Image (tube, rainbow, N blue to C red):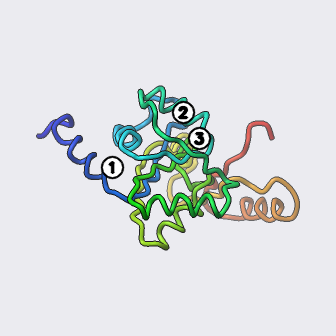
């Protein structure tokens, strides 16, 4: 049996050093100790980090001892121009790490536009799995014994919220949805 210390660095170098790659990196949901070794190495080796909230990401990088890494904002309100700038960096050979505030980017979080644009240009998109609020909820609820439906965040008001609630109340599967503790 090979030890992790002997195997991981070579594997991580291969995964994190491919030029022109977009890494979709899961980050801790609440406990910073939940970050994976692969996520740490990917963040270290990426040329730049794209973040939903740069303050939170800078705090995470600082906790991990990663200093001086360029961090750009790419949140849910990112302009098409901001997405295009990131794609152009990828085409030019930069390795970018996309992170969200907590959990996996693109799962009810920003990043979909960038992932789609990168894939459309033939850019390699590599998921770096880690903590998942959806799976944590499924495991801890005791309600999921088979298929389940993930709804994400419900619309805040109006007919779209009513339609989403109707779906939740009529589906036969267990339902996982996100909601702010303030609402």
Pick whichever of labels 1 and 2 is earlier in the sequence.
1
Q: Can you identify the residue that label 2 sits on? A: 58
| Residue 123 or residue 159, whichever sits in front | 123
Label 1: which secondary element: helix
Q: Is residue 105 above or below residue 66?
A: below
Residue at horizontal 54 percent and vertical 40 percent from the top: 140
Q: Can you identify the residue that label 1 sits on? A: 16
In the picture, the quarter occupied by the C terminus is top right
Q: Mark 3 and mark 1 in contact? Answer it, CB < 8 Å.
A: no
Coordinates of residue 110 in the picture (x, y in percent): 62, 54
Q: Residue furthest left?
A: 1
- Near mark 2 (Cα within 10 A), the count class, few <14, some 14-19 or many ≥20, is some
- Near mark 1 (Cα within 10 A), the count class, few <14, some 14-19 or many ≥20, is many
Distance from disc 2 to disc 3, alpha carbons, whole Å, reads 11 Å
| Residue 158 or residue 175, whichever sits in front | 158
Distance from disc 3 to disc 1, alpha carbons, whole Å, reads 21 Å
Residue at horizontal 28 percent and vertical 46 percent from the top: 12
Instruction: Please tell me the numbered disc located at residue 101.
Output: 3
Label 3: which secondary element: loop
Q: Is residue 16 above or below residue 170?
A: above
Q: Is residue 49 above or below residue 127?
A: above
């Amino acid at each position: 049996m090979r030890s992790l210390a002997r195997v991981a660095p070579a594997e991580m170098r291969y995964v994190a050093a491919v030029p022109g790659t977009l890494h979709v990196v899961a980050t801790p949901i609440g406990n910073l100790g939940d970050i994976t070794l692969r996520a740490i190495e990917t963040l270290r080796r990426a040329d730049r980090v794209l973040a939903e909230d740069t303050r939170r990401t800078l705090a995470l990088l600082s906790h991990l001892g990663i200093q001086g890494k360029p961090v750009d904002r790419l949140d849910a309100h990112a302009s098409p121009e901001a997405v295009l700038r990131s794609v152009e960096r990828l085409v030019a050979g930069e390795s970018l790490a996309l992170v969200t505030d907590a959990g996996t980017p693109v799962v009810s979080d920003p990043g979909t536009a960038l992932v789609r644009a990168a894939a459309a240009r033939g850019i390699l998109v590599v998921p770096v799995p880690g903590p998942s609020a959806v799976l944590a909820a499924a495991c801890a609820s005791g309600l999921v014994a088979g298929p389940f439906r993930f709804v994400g965040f419900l619309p805040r008001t109006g007919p779209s919220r009513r339609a989403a609630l109707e779906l939740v109340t009529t589906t036969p599967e267990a339902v996982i949805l996100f909601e702010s503790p303030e609402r």
